[in-house]
Image: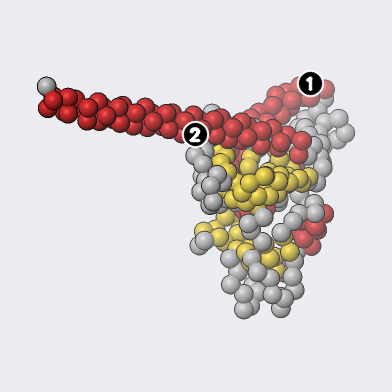
Amino acid sequence: MTKKKAIAMPFNWIFAIIAGGFILFFAVFSAGKFIRTSEQVIYTETAASLVSLFDPLETGLASGKSSEIIFKKKSKIFLDCDENSNKPFGKQTIRFTEQTFGDEYGETGQPITIKDKYVFSDNVIEGKEMYYFTKPFFAGFKVNDLLIIYSNQNNYCVYNANEDFQGDIEGLNLKNIHFPNKTDICNGVEICFGGVGGRKCDIKVFEDQNYVLKNGRKLYYVNDLIYGAVFSSSEIYECNVKRIKSRFNELAQIYLDKIEIIERKNCEPKLGPKLAVLIGENIRNSNDLLLFNEKIKEINEINQRAKDGCKVYYNINWER
């Protein structure tokens, strides 16, 4: 009996320790899971709020608008683009997270879908302050706004920029974008228009050939798409170019319907067949923008020559 009692006591303690340890582990695990779930909910809501902040920057016929976001903690925004989903317009997704302990980031929230905007940026934007601006994109008529985002983590040094580019950036009062002289020292991402000897030139802009060279890849642009090419990753840029062409197709179809109406008012618009052909042409990559733009110029000239009351559209300030 004495031996049995000696054995029973340690067993009770061992059982209590194991059971207590299991309960403690379960409690810690549940608390951690609850915290992570709560964080993900907050991050998902934050991503949705970011999308809603973009709405007031729609330009109408303005030349551009700008704003900024200041977070309490260092944050990350993840952007993806898929031209094949949500036909015919494609879509983008945005996810958000912020620093939790030290330099560690929490798990991102659920992706929020962006269907009606064209956001140009790096795939991952990191910083406590983020700046964004819009520029309208015209292809004869206005197609949509281009939304460009970058953070205070990047300092941009633009050399030998043309007057339009520098005037737009300075007119929008954009931060962290500088225009030093060729000999000035400026620490940051170097953007060089043309050849600037003696500089590393992370991004090169070749205006005579309408392309931006980034990471060994040529991103072709027309008009204000230059800002998308300069400030976004090649993947997001190429995807959005295709999405913009899809939107152009849908709007152009509406103008074709308008042509049928104004023909009944003794108007003889001659751009209809050319517009119909352009709708059927795909843009495989940004290089196709150059031929697309030449055809748009021709259509726009035809529209401008039409007599009053017979123009198909009136937003003719699509090109400087």
- Image quarter for residue 265? top right
Single out the mark in the foreground, 1 or 2: 2
Q: CA distance from mark 1 to mark 2?
A: 63 Å
Residue in front for this viewpoint, 234 or 280: 234
Whole-percent x, y for residue 51 in the image: 66, 35
Q: Residue at x 27, y 29 (%)?
A: 13
First in sequence: mark 1 or mark 2?
2
Whole-percent x, y for residue 132 in the image: 70, 47
Query: What amino acid type is highlighted by mark number 2?
Result: Arg
Query: What amino acid type is highlighted by mark number 1?
Result: Arg
Residue in front for this viewpoint, 110 or 245: 110
> Is 136 above or below relative to 88?
below
Q: Would you name the residue on which mark 2 appears?
A: 36
Q: Residue at x 64, y 58 (%)?
A: 154
Q: Dot 1 surroundings within 10 Å: few (below 14), some, or many (20 or more)?
A: few
Disc 1 is placed on an element classified as helix
- Image quarter for residue 153? bottom right
Which colour style is shown?
A: secondary structure
Count how many numbered circles sit on residues in the image: 2
